[in-house]
Amino acid sequence: MISTTNTKKSFFLSAYLIFFIIHTNQTGVGIAGVQRIIFLEAGQDAWISLLISYIGMAIVVFAMCYTLKTFESKDLFQIHKLLFGRWIGNVLNIILVLYLLLGLMSMLLNYTEIVQAWVFPDLKTWAIVSLLLLISIYGVYGGIKTIVGVSFLGFFLTIWLIFMLVVPLRYMEWTNFLPILEASPKELLKGAYKTSFTVLGLEILYFVYPYMRDKHKVHKYAQLAVFFTFILIFAVTFVGIGYYSGEQLEKTIWATLSMFKIVQFQNLERFEFFAVSLWLVIILPNTLFLLWAASKGLKRIFNRRQKSLVILCSVIVLICSCFFQKRTEINEFVDFVGVFGFYTIFVYSIILSLIVFLREKVKGVNRKR
């Protein structure tokens, strides 16, 4: 990306925007049905798994910020080349771009499935994906400031949905949380692991960091973002467990959307239809940032114009998306992306920070000599 030495100060973004960037990237399609996924592993103790997941997120954010702070104005693609050389660095960058494209495709397929199940059952997958990609291409062409603006506005346009949980909150059965601590430590850890797809989005910090003004404040706002994400997921999971019985929650694929069925307004009886439509605003920052980061990575590797690479990435994603028609296939693919993301972002980020730490220690020893 562009270094601080040759970039106009007006181009940089305020550090507080990191809060909106990370949070909106973590809050995507996964939150529509996260309760069921965790409940299948940890039962009524799913909320404890979320606490464990939050601790993991906080550690990963610390590791990311340490790595980025060490290299100042470099993104992860550039850091790979500096640490491992051109060839190994580019191999790692290709794996990273592959992950970003798979993440984009899983996001589009998940939302397409929701639209087909709730609103337009006869609408073809390619038609919905094409529309979403066209919107994403238009947004990415606007540049990083446009994408961040969408993220900022998307937060305020959709955050009010959390207050709709007040309605199902009145019908909660508090006995659904008993007995507490029935799940084993292994089940709690598996529940935390299963949230990996839902909380993916942290990786965007690796790519927007060079554009931030007051970089010393980035870590604070990034930690606030993951904490707010935790509170949001905790709220929908807590209400979901209390609202549904165990058997109902295991069978309810999109528990959050299903709870909106009981929300009614005088002139809007089917509120869940409106929620599905509004969910586009929730996933839009995800698709914009993933497409932008993937095309930026290819630009770093092949030294080509990013605008043409945006089209290339979109065509690849569209073609690959057409091969997924059945729900079971999409579920298996999403699970694969979740596992891929867990190791690529959570595990690798910690390993990378340790490599950087050892590198700095060795450099420090050499300087003293």
Image: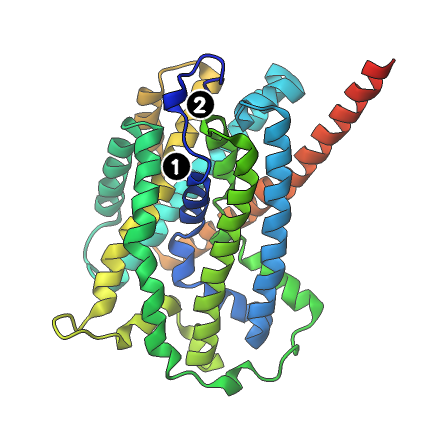
Residue 286: x percent and y percent?
A: 38, 43
* N-terminal-most mark, 2 or 1: 1
Kind of residue indicated by mark 1: Phe
Secondary structure beneath dot 2 equals helix
Kind of residue indicated by mark 2: Leu
Please say whether residue 18 is visible from this viewpoint. Answer: yes
Please say whether residue 113 is visible from this viewpoint. Answer: no
Task: Kindly give the residue lying farthest to the left in the view shown.
Answer: 267
Secondary structure beneath dot 1 equals helix
- Horizontal side of residue 89 vs 295, given as left or right: right
> Do residues under tags 2 and 1 come within 8 Å of each other at their CB atoms?
no
From the image, state whether disc 2 or disc 1 is nearer to you. 1
Q: At 54% from the left edge and 53% from the top edge, which residue is drawn? A: 196
Marks 2/1: CA–CA distance: 14 Å
Residue 323: x percent and y percent?
A: 35, 44
Residue 82: x percent and y percent?
A: 62, 18
Give the class, few, some or many, for how many residues have Cα within 10 Å of label 2's Cα (few <14, many ≥20): many
State which quarter of the image contains the C terminus: top right
Q: Nearer the viewer, residue 199 or 19?
A: 19
Q: At 33% from the left edge and 31% from the top edge, which residue is drawn? A: 145
Q: At 64% from the left edge and 26% from the top edge, which residue is drawn? A: 70
Locate residue 322: give its quadrant.
top left
Q: Specify the label residue 325 is tagged with.
A: none
Q: Specify the label residue 289 is tagged with.
A: 1
Residue 67: x percent and y percent?
A: 63, 31
Q: Which of 131 and 28 is in front in this view?
A: 28
Q: Nearer the viewer, residue 236 or 189?
A: 236
**107 lies above or below 306:** below
Residue at the spot of label 2: 298
- Horizontal side of residue 362 vs 78, given as left or right: right
Locate residue 64: give its quadrant.
top right
Count the marks: 2
